[in-house]
């Protein structure tokens, strides 16, 4: 009986020891997995932070370049054309001179060039976009496109327009410019519509066209050689300011691009 009792105690002790070792292994594996997941999460956060810093640097460099170009247009080219127009206004001709018509037409063309350059300067000017009324900046951009005759444009503001953070406003505007550029270049559209919607919870920008559209699967096709970086940059910029960008398109049915910025951002 003592031998049997000893065997039973041995079995119980062995089982307890085995359970203890198994529990230790399970706890070790769980802790290791948690630490590994934490490591992967920290690694992804560091990667995202690094990409955001690179994007910020790229945006700052681009904005500095555009600001310089804007100043050059305003301070140099615009002033030169203004002097040309002034000189044309000082030309004295006889009423019957055949050059009167040409001089008058030249003054009108120079005046139009000055106005177009002013609009272009505003479109490039970082301070004008980030500090001014958002809808006014969009209207200036659409007016430039309208004058080219390529597209019919429209702007609609829904809700009460309110000021946004200047940096976020600038990034949203640059995303919109990229969308509009893609429409002009690829969509073969006749009209373009921009809608700004303001609610207490969010600000939404919607840009739609009646062009040829495209298959969304093409955006995720790594084999496409003509796939540019413009759309990827738009998604990166949207994430940089905490916004969500979505693109909805079908062949023959145009394209709708929406960017939503939550109010807390």
Image: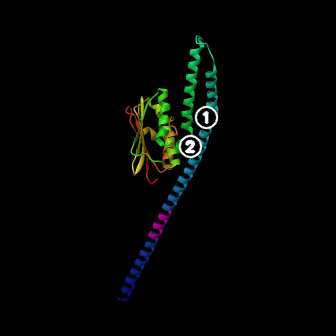
Q: Position of residue 97 (x, y in %)?
A: 60, 11
Q: Position of residue 53 (x, y in %)?
A: 57, 51
The quadrant in which residue 71 appears is top right
Rendered view: 111 above or below 123: above
Locate residue 20 relative to residue 129 in the image: left or right: left
In this rendering, does residue 185 appear at all?
Answer: no
Q: Residue furthest left?
A: 1
Q: Which residue is mark 2?
A: 127
Locate residue 79 relative to residue 251 in the image: left or right: right
Q: What colouring does the structure picture have?
A: rainbow
Q: Are the two marked residues, 2 and 1, in contact with CB atoms closer than 8 angstroms?
A: no
Residue appearing at x 43%, y 32% in the figure:
153
Alpha-carbon distance for marks 2 and 1? Answer: 14 Å
> Secondary structure beneath disc 1?
helix
Q: Quadrant of the N terminus?
A: bottom left
Q: Position of residue 29 (x, y in %)?
A: 47, 66
């Amino acid at each position: 009986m003592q031998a049997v009792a000893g065997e039973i105690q041995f079995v119980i002790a062995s089982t307890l020891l085995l359970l203890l070792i198994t529990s230790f292994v399970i706890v070790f594996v769980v802790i290791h997995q948690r630490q590994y997941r934490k490591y992967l999460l920290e690694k992804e956060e560091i990667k995202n932070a690094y990409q955001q810093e690179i994007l910020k640097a790229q945006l700052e460099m681009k904005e500095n370049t555009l600001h310089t170009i804007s100043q050059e247009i305003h301070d140099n080219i615009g002033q030169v054309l203004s002097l040309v127009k002034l000189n044309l206004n000082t030309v004295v001709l006889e009423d019957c001179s055949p050059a009167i018509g040409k001089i008058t037409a030249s003054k009108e063309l120079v005046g139009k060039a000055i106005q177009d350059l002013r609009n272009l300067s505003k479109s490039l000017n970082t301070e004008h976009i980030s500090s001014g009324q958002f809808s006014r900046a969009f209207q200036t951009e659409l007016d430039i496109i309208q004058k080219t005759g390529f597209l019919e444009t429209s702007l609609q503001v829904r809700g009460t327009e309110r000021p946004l953070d200047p940096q976020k406003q600038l990034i949203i505007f640059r995303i919109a410019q990229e969308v509009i550029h893609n429409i002009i270049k690829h969509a073969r559209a006749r009209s373009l519509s921009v809608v700004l919607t303001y609610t207490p919870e969010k600000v939404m920008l919607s840009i739609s066209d009646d062009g040829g559209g495209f298959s969304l699967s093409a955006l995720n096709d790594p084999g496409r050689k003509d796939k540019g970086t413009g759309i990827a940059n738009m998604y990166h910029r949207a994430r940089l300011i905490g916004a969500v960008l979505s693109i909805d398109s079908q062949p023959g049915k145009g394209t709708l691009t929406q960017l939503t910025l939550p109010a807390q951002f």
